[in-house]
Each structure stands twice: as C-alpha cells, then as structure tokens.
Image (cartoon, grey):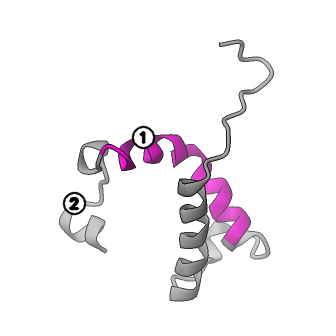
Amino acid sequence: MFVLDQCDGKLLSEMLNEKGAPFAEWYYDRYLKDFQRTLAKSLGSDYFVQDTWENYERIAGVLTEQYKNPQPVTKPWWEFW
C-alpha cells in the first residue's frame, strides 16, 4: 500500500538505493515468471491469486532468494551481443 498511497503507484529507480536499483532493473522482467511459477501455476490465471499474507510470504521468499543468489542472464540464441 505504501507505493500506492505515498508514491502514486510508481516505484522508480531513483527511489531505491545503490543495491536495490540494479536488482530491480535486473529482476523486473523475471518477476512475472517467478510470480506465475510460485503463485498462479495451478490457478489457470494470474488474476486468481489471492492477496493473502501466505502468498506474500511465498513470493517474498522467492524475491529474497533471487536477491541473494541472482541467476545468470541467458540471452536468446538470436542475440549476439
């Protein structure tokens, strides 16, 4: 609710510290896959994920693990640089 109430629903890199901003930029495209794999896999749609503390704890664990041990970026076979 903080981001919605205090930041007009926006979280910008300028609002993060020198460790958080690079992580957020790196993880932005990967988050949806982790969200779907962790919370929505058996539901059929992301929209069926309930806003509960249990789900928060589940995705928070994934975020923490990604922050502590980021996975290497793999490029598609057609990207050369």
Residue at 80% from the left image edge and 22% from the top image edge: 77
Q: Quadrant of residue 47?
A: bottom right
Residue 52 pos. (x, y %): 52, 86
Q: Amino acid at mark 2?
A: Cys
Residue at 79% from the left image edge and 75% from the top image edge: 42
Residue 57 pos. (x, y %): 55, 80
User: Left or right: 79 with respect to 28?
Assistant: right
Of the numbered discs 2 and 1, the one sitting upstream in the chain is: 2
Query: What segment carries the magenta color?
Result: 18-38
- Say which residue label 2 marks: 7
User: Left or right: 70 with respect to 37?
Assistant: left
The one nearer the camera, 52 or 69, is 69
Q: Nearer the viewer, mark 2 or mark 1?
A: 1
- Say which residue label 1 marks: 22
Q: Is residue 61 magenta?
A: no
Residue 29 vertical position relative to residue 49 in the rendered view, above or below: above
